[in-house]
Image (cartoon, rainbow, N blue to C red):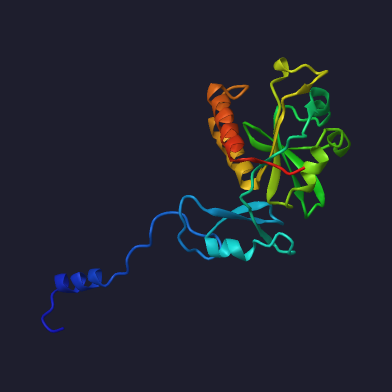
């Protein structure tokens, strides 16, 4: 436009600029914005969680299909017949009283991880020892491969009689809940045993899991 000054040109350019994209998380598949509370899909081969929108999540919700990605369900169960003694737990060679177990379809085996200051550490799971735990085999058969886990907690060693069944807790939970749990522990961990803040977080986390869980049918 004749006679337009530099200031007028800059004003028009600024007025025609596209709005800035919204700040926040985006779906890792289609890049659509997603809320802070969102669902996840597992990349089976890479064993990675992906944040997704509802539409992308539903594409991979069929747990019986052979897919590269699998949607993480939102199921919480507890087991009335799960019985665990300290000797059986020690035979699993897990150095702490917390672990989660899931079936890795790529490896076609059950794997176990336990939390610590470095994050999730894989344990060499002795399936023979696992089979001696009351109700454990049935609980494993209920898991959806790759996307659900058994989360187990046993009392501190000094509070458990090795000759008796202890009040162990076992829950079927979404796999993303396990990784969220381990990640938060890693952030809070202080010193050799984690510290008081870690113990309070563990108690609170299991309170919330317990409240969401229903008893699995016999």
Q: Where is residue 131, by image quadrant?
A: top right
* Residue furthest front in the image: 218
- From what the image shows, is residue 41 above or below residue 127? below
- Residue 81 drawn at (x, y percent): 77, 34
- From what the image shows, is residue 95 above or below residue 106? above
**Residue at position x 77%, y 34% in the image:** 82
- From what the image shows, is residue 81 above or below residue 9? above
Left or right, residue 139 beside residue 76? right
Q: Quadrant of the C terminus?
A: top right
Q: Where is residue 7, by image quadrant?
A: bottom left
- Residue 26 drawn at (x, y percent): 48, 58
- Out of 73 and 184, give the one closest to the viewer: 73
**Residue at position x 78%, y 30% in the image:** 83
Left or right, residue 131 beside residue 49? right
Q: Quadrant of the N terminus?
A: bottom left
- Out of 6 and 192, give the one closest to the viewer: 192
- Residue 171 drawn at (x, y percent): 68, 38
């Amino acid at each position: 436009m004749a006679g337009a000054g530099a200031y007028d040109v800059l004003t028009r350019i600024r007025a025609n600029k596209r709005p800035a994209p919204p700040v926040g998380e985006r779906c890792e598949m289609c890049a659509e914005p997603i809320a802070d509370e969102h669902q996840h899909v597992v990349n089976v081969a890479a064993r990675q969680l992906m944040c997704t929108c509802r539409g992308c999540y539903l594409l991979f919700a069929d747990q019986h299909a052979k897919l590269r990605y699998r949607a993480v369900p939102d199921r919480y169960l507890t087991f009335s017949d799960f019985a665990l003694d300290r000797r059986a737990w020690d035979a699993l060679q897990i150095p702490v009283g917390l672990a989660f177990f899931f079936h890795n379809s790529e490896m076609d085996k059950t794997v176990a991880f336990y939390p610590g200051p470095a994050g999730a550490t894989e344990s060499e799971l002795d399936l023979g020892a696992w089979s001696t735990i009351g109700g454990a085999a049935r609980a494993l058969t209920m898991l959806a491969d790759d996307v659900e886990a058994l989360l187990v907690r046993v009392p501190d060693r000094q509070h458990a009689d090795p000759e008796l069944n202890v009040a162990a807790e076992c829950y079927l939970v979404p796999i993303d809940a396990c990784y969220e749990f381990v990640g938060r522990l890693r952030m809070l961990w202080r010193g050799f045993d984690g510290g008081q803040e870690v113990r309070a977080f563990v108690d609170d986390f299991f309170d919330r899991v317990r409240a969401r869980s229903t008893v699995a049918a016999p």
